Image (cartoon, rainbow, N blue to C red):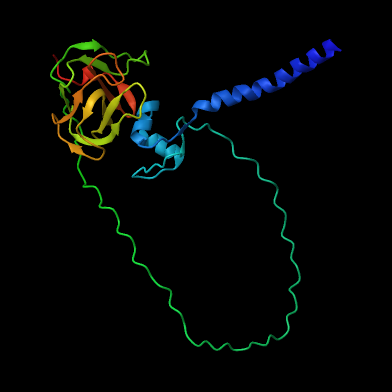
Amino acid sequence: MYRMATQWMRRRLLLLLPVALLTACGAHMHHVVEPGETLYSIGFLYGYDYRKIAQWNGIPPPYVLNPGQVLRVVPPQQESPPAKAPSRPPVRKPAPVVGPVKVTPRVVDRVETPEVKPAAPLPAPRPVVSLPKNPRWQWPVKSRRVLQTFSAKDPGRKGIDIVGRRGDPVYAAAAGRVVYAGSGLVRYGQLIIIKHNEKYLSAYAHNDKLRVKEGDVVKAGQRIADMGSSGAQRPMLHFEIRRDGKPANPLRYLPQR
């Protein structure tokens, strides 16, 4: 009796194992939008261009997200469309015989006009700013002591770490628009993301104080934050450049020391 129960349990586990594996594989396919997140910050987190994630989820510009919204954050797999069932010829039914219909006219005393409420005013559109085609990069801090360099093979080294003192000014490395400013991304602390054009983004992490907000247009060299240690063990600036959503080596773009 014990042997039969053991064999039954083994067969049961073998049947449930593929289901468990499929569930675990799909756990990282979607992202639940948290308050304050933008499509730029989510694309930055998963290493994909924000336009790709918008395309996978059918989100048109200006890419408005709602808290609790579930987004696909990996490319959808190619799936063959389901086979169509064979169509059957339509069955024609004889038209029903309709006799004469007596219509009684209705007397309407008055026509009530529904009350029309004035529409709510639309929000003021953001000013149209022409972003540079090729950003002219500059160092985001005065210090050029690089503590950790970029590595394409190491996921923990997507940018460079520049050592400095708490409160040192952090500057925009190129002109652009702030598309994220907050602390919603784990391990980045107080973070700023700037969109420079349709190809390039730059990120400034571990700040102590943010001096710009989402939607602000900044110039190259404008002070955007104060250096700090939020999400880090010592005061530093973690600086990244993303090209089409993919991390790029900032030292290839910044002026030589």
* The C terminus lies in quadrant: top left
Q: Residue furthest right?
A: 1
User: Which residue occupies 63% across, 40% down?
Assistant: 82
Q: For residue 251, what is the image quadrant?
A: top left
The vertical placement of 119 against 10, above or below, is: below
User: Which residue occupies 30% across, 56% down?
Assistant: 122
Residue 236, given in percent of the width and then of the height, sits at 23, 17
Q: For residue 163, what is the image quadrant?
A: top left
Q: For residue 106, what is the image quadrant?
A: bottom right
User: 108 and 96: which one is in front?
Assistant: 108
Residue 47 in view: no
Residue 93 in view: yes
The vertical placement of 50 against 110, above or below, is: above
On the picture, is 218 further left or further right than 186? left
Residue 223, given in percent of the width and then of the height, sits at 15, 29
Residue 219, given in percent of the width and then of the height, sits at 15, 34
User: Which residue occupies 73% across, 80% down?
Assistant: 98
On the picture, is 184 further left or further right than 211? right
* The N terminus lies in quadrant: top right
